[in-house]
Image (cartoon, rainbow, N blue to C red):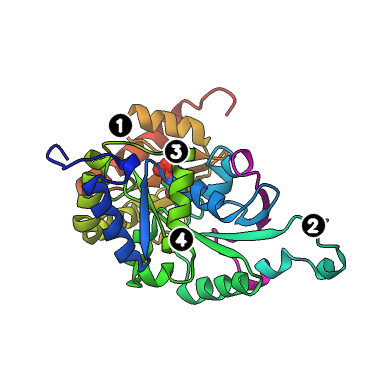
Amino acid sequence: MAEAEVGDDVYGDDPTVKALEAATAELLGKDDAVYMPSGTMTNQVGIRTHTQPGDAALYDHQAHVYQLEGGASAAISGVLPRLLPGVRGIFSPADVESAFGRDHRFVPSAVAPPVRLLCLENTHNAGGGSVWPLDTLTAVAGAGRARGLALHLDGARLWHATVATGVAEAAYAAPFDSVSVCFSKALGAPVGSCLAGSHALVARARRFKQQFGGGFRQAGIIAAGALHALRHHRERLHETHANARRFAEGLAAMPGIALDLATVETNIVRFQLTHVAASAFVDEAHRRGVHMLPSGSDGVRAVFYLDIAPQDVDDALTVVDRTLAALARSPPEGA
Ligand SMILES: *Cc1c(COP(=O)(O)O)cnc(C)c1O
């Protein structure tokens, strides 16, 4: 990164950014890609690129684009979300169809907000890193296409789906008009995401990237980290999956924890606490050196990335065990 060759990204002449964009487009089987500072920006620029204010978009009810991006698609693009009832983020062609309603043909076209866009997320964050089966993904995308929808894939964690199944990133990306991928999660780069698609889509996206304030000048410094991660770290991601499984198996054997091992598919472990509140548990574990996130009153999310070694996993299990014991001895007020 310190030796990265840089130019000015706003003028499209930063050679390291351009190399990253070309490598990402090639990997995803698309014409072109555009580098931006965050996965939220690549998703939201993608959504903006496909829609006009007042359009509706179909999202899973737990989608990152819906729940965790600050309400951006409503605030910035004026998009009306229509939520689909996914299970761990995965829904069916019938769910897509149901969003149109039986009596749709009786509604004058000027009255109903037009549904323009369908978004999928693979792997699914709130679903615990769940992987879309390729045939389900293809069928759902086909249902959207049959309704004339644009298709966007939030592939922030797409690498993990590939590691888990052996299905290439480009095969998952194939049905979609736009795909966003993230270099700064388990992959180990400090900053950034790419949005990939056709030449025309990426040209339009570059305009909105600038409009959203995402033109970032000598970005080659951080693009170099992303390019290194893309070239050298995808092949190591299986380590994060093995560590997640090792942690999950340790947790599943502990009293006070409910965890279905079948839900641990990639690098995310979601579990429930049966006797203590998630907030007290997470605070105490944090104090003892293990950082996890609470979700709801009794749920916890643990995520594994490249710098975590198997020995760290065993240490983390010891911390969880001691945390549960400490909370059992002195339950926090209100518990
Ligand atoms: C992290 C994540 C994002 C957003 O990435 P940021 O870089 O944090 O904005 C989008 N989608 C999914 C599924 C994610 O896990």
User: Label 1 near label 4: C-beta < 8 Å?
Assistant: no
Compared with residue 307, is residue 26 higher up or lower down, i.e. above or below? below
Compared with residue 290, is residue 206 higher up or lower down, i.e. above or below? below
User: Badge 3: few (under 14), some or many (20 or more) residues near its Cα, within 10 Å?
Assistant: some
Nearest to the eye among marks 2 and 4: give it: 4
Mark closest to the chain's N terminus, 3 or 4: 4
User: Label 1 near label 3: C-beta < 8 Å?
Assistant: no
Q: Label 2 vs label 4: CA separation? A: 28 Å
Residue at (62, 38) in percent of width and height = 75
Q: Quadrant of the N terminus?
A: top left
User: Label 2 near label 1: C-beta < 8 Å?
Assistant: no
User: Label 4 near label 3: C-beta < 8 Å?
Assistant: no
Where residue 198 appears, as percent x and y from the top left, is 43, 64
Query: Is ligand 1 within 8 Å of the beta carbon of the residue shown at mark 2?
Result: no
Q: Label 1 vs label 2: CA separation? A: 52 Å
Q: Label 3 vs label 4: CA separation? A: 39 Å
Mark closest to the chain's N terminus, 1 or 2: 2
From the viewer's perspective, tell me whether residue 12 is left or right of residue 98. left
Q: Which mark is residue 289?
A: 1
From the viewer's perspective, tell me whether residue 233 is left or right of residue 322. left
Where residue 325 appears, as percent x and y from the top left, is 40, 34
Q: Label 2 vs label 3: CA separation? A: 39 Å
Compared with residue 120, is residue 228 higher up or lower down, i.e. above or below? above
Nearest to the eye among marks 1 and 2: give it: 2
Mark closest to the chain's N terminus, 4 or 1: 4
For disc 4, the marked residue is: 200
Query: Is ligand 1 within 8 Å of the beta carbon of the residue shown at mark 4?
Result: no
88 part of magenta stretch = yes
Q: Secondary structure at mark 4?
A: helix
Residue at (83, 56) in percent of width and height = 111
